[in-house]
Amino acid sequence: MTEPRTIEVKVRSWSENGEGEFVSYSVPLDGEMDVLNALEYIRAHCNPTVWYRSSCRRGVCGGCRMTIDGVLRLACETEIKDGMRIDPYRTREASND
């Protein structure tokens, strides 16, 4: 049996002072995966402190919206690709602007 292909994604890790940096994670690509699947893998196998929101997983509620490669998108509808940069969605209130 062959090993699954592994891709690298970068997830922004925020600190309490509002500064953040991208942290790289290797994720095994299992068929067609969306960004939400990749974040679930990272949380379960790499870093249990990774935080994200999701609810319906059908692209209806908008709970999993985040900035992916600089564009605001839904994580449950965005196919994961090697080298993606994933930012949590932050409102003006959340960022204290």
Image (cartoon, rainbow, N blue to C red):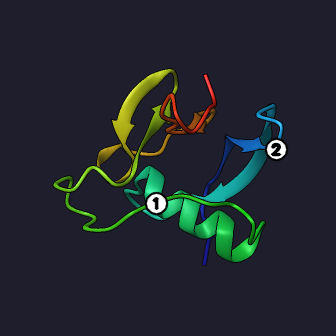
Helix, strand or loop at disc 2? loop
Dot 2 corresponds to which residue?
15
Residue 88 sits in quarter = top right
Residue at 65% across / 57% down in the picture?
Answer: 27
Residue at 34% across / 54% down in the picture?
Answer: 63
Up the image or down, 83 lies above or below 64; here it is above
Dot 1 corresponds to which residue?
53
Q: Return the residue nearer the eye: 44 or 30.
A: 44
Residue 48 sits in quarter = bottom right
Helix, strand or loop at disc 1? loop
Quick check: can you spot residue 3?
no
Residue at 38% across / 52% down in the picture?
Answer: 64
Mark 1 Cα-neighbour bin, 10 Å: few <14, some 14–19, many ≥20: few
Drawn side of residue 64 relative to residue 11, left or right: left
- Residue 69, position in %: x, y? 52, 25
- Residue 51, position in %: x, y? 62, 60
Instruction: Estimate the spatial distance between the alpha carbons at disc 2 and disc 1, rounded to whole Å.
Output: 17 Å
Q: Return the residue nearer the eye: 86 or 93.
A: 93
Up the image or down, 89 lies above or below 3; here it is above
Drawn side of residue 91 relative to residue 97, left or right: left
Q: Amino acid at mark 2?
A: Ser
